[in-house]
Image: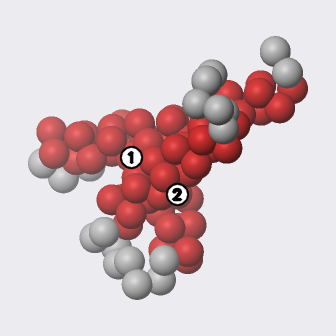
Amino acid sequence: MRPVLALVHVLNFALSLGMWLILGRAALGVLTGGRPSPLQTLFDRATAPLFGLTRRALPFVGETWAPMAAFALLALLRVALIVLAHPSGRP
């Protein structure tokens, strides 16, 4: 595997992990009813940097919409990464 392609796979994995963390935080928040739990604290600490970057990049996004905006940005970055890494459409 070419080194550039390996880097693309690592970046794709990192973006995917961020998306899953955001989904996990949302699902856990619904399941626990907002009550604090150790697992909720773990997800909060793992996703806080993503939400902070999102609020800095998009200042008009408030606290309520930061998770959705962060998820959308990660999804767009993944699509852009794949399109740029494979311009012919072949993996």
Please say whether residue 47 is visible from this viewpoint: no
Quarter of the figure that contains the N terminus: top right
Q: How is the image coloured?
A: secondary structure
Distance of label 2 from label 1 (alpha carbons): 9 Å
Q: Residue at x 85, y 21 (%)?
A: 2
Q: Residue at x 16, y 45 (%)?
A: 30
Left or right of residue 50, residue 43 in this image: left
What residue is drawn where x is 67% and y is 44%? 84
Q: For the view shown, which residue lies furthest in the front direction?
A: 88
Q: Earlier in the sequence, mark 2 or mark 1?
A: 1
Task: Name the foreground residue: 28 vs 59.
Answer: 59
Disc 1 element: helix
Kindly identify the amino acid type of the residue bearing the numbered disc 2: Leu
Q: Return the residue found at the far bottom.
A: 60
Q: Nearer the viewer, residue 70 or 37?
A: 70
Q: Say which residue label 1 marks.
A: 22
Is the residue 3 above or below the residue 24 in the image?
A: above
Residue found 47% across the figure and 83% down from its top? 59
Residue type at mark 1? Ile
Quadrant of the rendered image containing residue 57:
bottom right
Locate residue 46 relative to residue 34 in the image: left or right.
Answer: right
Would you say 4 lies left or right of 73 here?
right
| Residue contact at pointers 2 and 1, CB within 8 angstroms | yes
The x, y position of residue 58, in whole percent, is: 48, 77
Q: Quadrant of the C terminus?
A: top right
Is residue 81 among what the camera can see?
Answer: yes
Give the percent coordinates (x, y) of residue 56.
55, 76
Q: Determine whether 2 is above or below 25 in the image.
A: above
Residue indicated by mark 2 = 50
Foreground of the two, 8 or 23: 8
The numbered dot on residue 58 is none
Comparing 86 with 68, the one in front is 86
